[in-house]
Image (cartoon, rainbow, N blue to C red):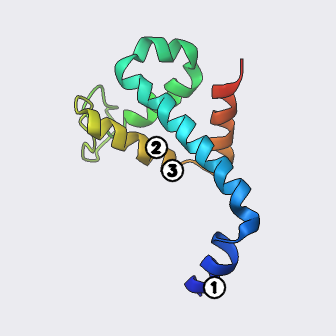
Amino acid sequence: MKEFNYKYIYLDERLQPSTEYFKIIITTIYNTLKKYYTDKEGISKMYPEIMKNFEEWLKMYWNYERYEMCKNKIVFNIENENEFYQAIIYYISGMTDNYAIDIYNKIISF
């Protein structure tokens, strides 16, 4: 079944344009969120809603200003740049397609 899916669905030539489109979406979101690490204030001014949602998500998993209700283990050390970038990957992987497209459209809009 897995072989069939790859051959006739995932790697089908007709899906190539959408594959490229989603690469652009995911890369744009990743690079935008990555700027938060070095320019929190500037990027938050440019994309307040996007950064607020990302920070709200982060507060459940990082070692900085956590919600009191969080009883889970700290997953990301916010002072470690590589762990911050890993957090971005986790955040994006939890997005629905529609949410990712919405975020992308907000990033590229004026």
Q: Tell whether label 1 touches label 2 (CB within 8 Å).
A: no
What residue do we see at 27% from left, 32% from top?
81
| Mark 2 or mark 1, whichever is nearer to me | 1
Secondary structure state at the residue bearing disc 1: helix
Asked whether residue 62 appears in the rendered view, the answer is: no
| Pick the front one: 26 or 7 | 7
Q: Quadrant of residue 47?
A: top right
Depth order, front residue of 18/86: 18
Closest to the camera, between mark 1 and mark 3, is 1
Q: What residue type is labelled 2?
A: Tyr
7 sits to left or right of 75 = right
Picture quadrant of residue 34: top left
Residues 104 and 53: in front is 104
Residue furthest bottom as drawn: 1
Q: Residue 4 carries which label?
A: 1
Give the SS element for disc 3: loop
Mark closer to the chain start, 2 or 1: 1
Which residue bears the numbered disc 2? 91
Three-letter amino acid code of the residue under disc 1:
Phe
Residue, x 56% and y 35% (percent of image)? Answer: 28
Q: Position of residue 10 (x, y in %)?
A: 64, 70
Task: Give residue 79's mark.
Answer: none
Pick out the residue farthest to the right.
14
Residue on which disc 3 sits: 94
**Label 1 neighbour load within 10 Å: few <14, some 14-19, many 20+:** few
Whether residue 16 sits left or right of residue 84 in the image: it is: right
Q: Examine the rendered structure and indicate whether residue 8 appears above or below residue 64.
A: below
